[in-house]
Image (spheres, helix red, strand yellow):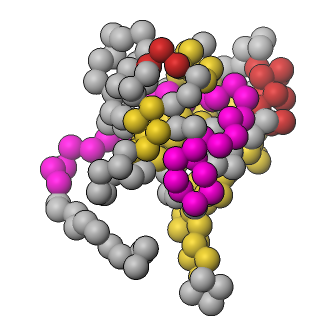
């Protein structure tokens, strides 16, 4: 049976950190990275049991790096499964907070709002996730604010949503923050990734 559970999960150490440190937008939606059934498209997926949602290589991509302030940005994946219809999907939500207004922000936010990009997310535990792998993620909400009081945030909050057959994909874990391709340095062909 294709949906047989194959692995258990042990209780781990209490050393995980919440929050995100960086996001990387694929500059233009890359159709076919992962197929709708969760199988590999142009991305290469691990074939080891229990790791089939780990990306081991990517095709040539240009990604745009956005550094994030600690304790402000997050992601949530909601499971939507209905036994009456026999359907299951995962709703991915990414909330980003970008402090301050920069001269390039209006144009970039306009372009992001018109795109449906795959988004790579680096958390504070050095886990690299890929969201919107098959259908992309859409900017579907947010605010651009000046704040009212002098100690309130001036900047943008952006909310992205995606609906996928998989909760998310791990990308081979980064290990060398000094590497020019970090956090993509451990995929099979890191030269495929251009970080802007």
Residue 1 in view in this figure: yes
Report the span colored magenta.
12-41
> Who's the residue at 73% across and 29% down the image?
28
Query: Where residue 161 sits: x, y (%)?
Result: 67, 51
Give the prevailing secondary structure in the magenta stretch. loop
Residue 55, image quadrant: top left
Left or right relative to 124: residue 9 = left
Asked if the magenta segment contains residue 28, the reply would be yes
Count of numbered badges drawn on the protein: 0
Residue farthest bottom in this picture: 84
Left or right relative to 143: residue 172 = left
- Front-most of 188 and 180? 188
Up the image or down, 175 lies above or below 52; here it is above
Left or right relative to 39: residue 117 = right
Residue 20 in view in this figure: no
Instruction: Point out the image quarter for the C terminus.
Output: top right
Query: Where residue 39 sits: x, y (%)?
Result: 52, 53
Instruction: Point out the image quarter for the N terminus.
Output: bottom left
Up the image or down, 132 lies above or below 112; here it is below
> Who's the residue at 30% across and 18% down the image?
176
Asked if the magenta segment contains residue 196, the reply would be no
Query: Where residue 109 sits: x, y (%)?
Result: 78, 28
> Who's the residue at 22% across and 67% down the image?
8
Up the image or down, 175 lies above or below 124; here it is above
Left or right relative to 116: residue 97 = left
Residue 104, image quadrant: top right
Query: Where residue 134 sits: x, y (%)?
Result: 64, 49
């Amino acid at each position: 049976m294709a949906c047989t559970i194959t692995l258990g999960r042990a209780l781990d150490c209490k050393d995980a950190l919440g929050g995100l440190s960086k996001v990387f937008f694929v500059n233009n939606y890359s159709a076919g990275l992962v197929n709708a059934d969760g199988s590999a498209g142009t991305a290469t997926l691990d074939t080891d049991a229990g790791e089939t949602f780990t990306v081991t290589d990517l095709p040539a991509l240009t990604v745009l790096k956005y550094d994030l302030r600690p304790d402000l940005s997050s992601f949530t994946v909601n499971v939507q499964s209905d036994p009456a219809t026999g359907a299951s999907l995962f709703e991915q939500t990414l909330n980003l907070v970008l402090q301050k207004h920069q001269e390039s922000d209006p144009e970039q936010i306009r372009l992001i709002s018109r795109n449906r990009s795959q988004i790579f997310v680096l958390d504070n535990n050095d886990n690299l996730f890929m969201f919107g792998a098959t259908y992309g993620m859409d900017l579907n909400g947010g605010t651009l604010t000046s704040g009212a009081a002098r100690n309130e945030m001036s900047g943008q909050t952006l909310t992205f949503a995606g609906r996928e057959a998989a909760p998310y994909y791990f990308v081979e874990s980064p290990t060398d923050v000094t590497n020019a391709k970090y956090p993509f340095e451990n995929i099979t062909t890191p030269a495929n990734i251009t970080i802007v």
